[in-house]
Image (cartoon, rainbow, N blue to C red):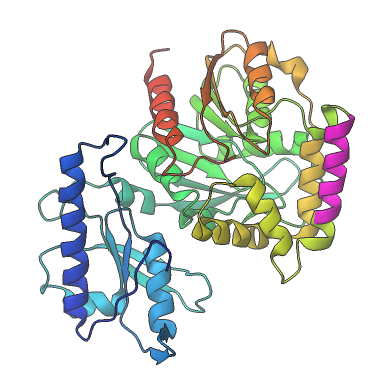
């Protein structure tokens, strides 16, 4: 189990009571540490707990069966410091434990062939005592819509949270539903939905958007963003780009400066691999060849190599999710098409035409997009603020020191007066 534990209970009420008591004790312990520690002192720790009621069997000291498989998946979706239970558990414990669980609805769990209805206690404040919505509650209210881009491609977009709009530009390997449960994305989506109405969408040939499209190009990506913004009836909004979404955001902001109030760019580039010199171009061609031949195979060895580049500091759970994201979000053929379009992007000539306030952030050890590309982009955008972050993951994970810094910088920038 690594840093986890698996426990079997004869009583489901005992199981949930134990989980709640454990999380409360951990919260009490962490509060005494004040969120900090000395070099030789204890560190705060948070656990996720999943509880399921189901059949199991024991063999050679190991526990098997859907009963434990579902519990393990619930643990992965549970909030840090909280408890997530299946509907079969909730029916047995409601009114018998001193916490109230909020309804998370049905969820698709990895390697489980049927949806599982889930209930959540966030470990912080009981809903009965505080009827206001928690971050996790707000993040669950995702609504998926479809719109049509200029060439007829169907684009899937989603809205979540409340407050002023925040639009996230597209990037490849996204899936509106799969990302919603992901230990890689859930903290980002929940946090961005806390104070804003987050609007995000799956790029064409990717996720829930149309895979069967004739054109996969940078111009098409910008057109898709235009279509989503119009469909969501947004007049003026901040625009947030991640990775390749940065170039798309810049192009949109230059074309529609009256609609973009602020520009946030993280982990991005103005020029793709094939525009950065022969070494990067050779690497790009080699990577596309590997994607074409290895992406769709049942053996995930190639996908794991790709995952390790994106998330060198990830956990096994996070790697498994990212491996699966590659499989469900895009076909090998479309992955090559999207990668080719991204590798050939060069919007360098647009950088000095950006007129909206801009914040650029980039991790120093990013192995997918070099730190120098983010710095170059910031240097060429008039008045842009650049924030270097510690870390080597392309996507900032929830437990990284860079995450609270990233979030604080983003929120402070969005809250600044125009």
- List the single residue furthest toward the front: 40
Provide the residue span drawn in magenta: 278-290
**Residue 128 spot, x, y in % from top left:** 11, 56
Residue 124 seen in the figure = no
**Residue 309 spot, x, y in % from top left:** 66, 46
Left or right of 63: which side holds 249?
right
The residue drawn where x is 19% and y is 84% is: 11
Residue 21 to residue 159: above or below? below
Placement of the N terminus among the 4 image quadrants = bottom left
Q: Within the image, what quadrant is residue 164 found in?
A: top left
The residue drawn where x is 59% and y is 56% is: 322
Viewer-nearest residue: 217 or 187: 187
Residue 265 seen in the figure = yes
Placement of the C terminus among the 4 image quadrants = top left
Q: Within the image, what quadrant is residue 26 found in?
A: bottom left
Residue 265 to residue 243: above or below? above
Viewer-nearest residue: 151 or 55: 55
The residue drawn where x is 79% and y is 55% is: 291
Left or right of 41: which side holds 193?
right
- List the single residue furthest toward the top: 383
The main secondary structure of the magenta stretch is: helix
Is residue 124 covered in magenta? no
Left or right of 31: which side holds 305?
right
Residue 80 to residue 300: above or below? above
**Residue 375 spot, x, y in % from top left:** 64, 19
Left or right of 138: which side holds 304?
right
**Residue 195 spot, x, y in % from top left:** 34, 34
Viewer-nearest residue: 86 or 19: 19
Q: Within the image, what quadrant is residue 400 found in?
A: top left
Numbered marks: total:
0
């Amino acid at each position: 189990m690594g840093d986890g534990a698996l426990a079997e209970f004869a009583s489901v009420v005992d199981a949930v009571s134990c989980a709640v008591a454990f999380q409360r004790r951990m919260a009490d312990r962490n509060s005494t540490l004040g969120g900090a520690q000395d070099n030789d002192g204890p560190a705060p720790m948070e656990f996720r707990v999943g509880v399921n009621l189901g059949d199991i069997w024991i063999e050679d000291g190991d526990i098997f069966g859907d009963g434990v498989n579902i519990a393990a998946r619930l643990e992965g979706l549970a909030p840090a410091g909280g408890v997530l239970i299946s509907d079969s558990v909730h029916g047995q414990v409601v009114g018998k434990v001193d916490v109230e669980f909020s309804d998370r609805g049905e969820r698709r769990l990895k390697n489980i062939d049927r949806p599982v209805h889930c209930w959540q206690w966030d470990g912080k404040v009981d809903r009965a005592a505080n009827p206001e919505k928690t971050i996790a509650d707000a993040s669950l209210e995702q609504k998926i819509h479809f719109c049509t881009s200029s060439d007829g491609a169907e684009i899937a977009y989603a809205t979540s949270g409340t407050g002023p709009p925040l639009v996230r530009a597209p990037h490849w390997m996204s899936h509106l539903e799969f990302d919603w449960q992901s230990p890689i994305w859930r903290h980002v989506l929940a946090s961005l939905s806390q104070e804003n109405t987050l609007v995000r969408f799956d790029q064409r040939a990717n996720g829930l958007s149309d895979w069967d499209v004739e054109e996969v190009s940078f111009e098409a990506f910008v057109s898709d963003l235009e279509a989503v913004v119009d469909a969501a009836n947004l007049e003026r909004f901040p625009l947030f780009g991640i990775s390749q979404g940065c170039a798309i955001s810049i192009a949109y902001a230059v074309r529609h400066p009256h609609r973009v109030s602020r520009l946030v760019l993280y982990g991005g580039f103005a020029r793709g691999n094939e525009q950065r010199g022969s070494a990067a171009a050779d690497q790009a061609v080699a990577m596309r060849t590997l994607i074409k031949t290895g992406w769709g195979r049942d053996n995930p060895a190639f996908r794991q190599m790709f995952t390790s580049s994106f998330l060198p500091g990830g956990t096994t759970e996070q790697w498994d999710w990212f491996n699966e994201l590659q499989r469900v979000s895009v076909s090998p053929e479309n992955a090559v098409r999207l990668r080719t379009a991204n590798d050939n992007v060069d919007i360098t000539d647009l950088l000095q035409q950006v007129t909206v306030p801009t914040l650029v952030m980039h991790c120093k050890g990013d192995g997918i997009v070099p730190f120098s590309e983010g710095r170059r982009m910031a240097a060429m955008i008039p008045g842009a603020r650049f924030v270097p972050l510690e870390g080597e993951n392309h996507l900032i994970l929830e437990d990284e020191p860079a995450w609270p810094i990233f979030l604080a910088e983003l929120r402070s920038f969005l809250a600044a007066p125009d």
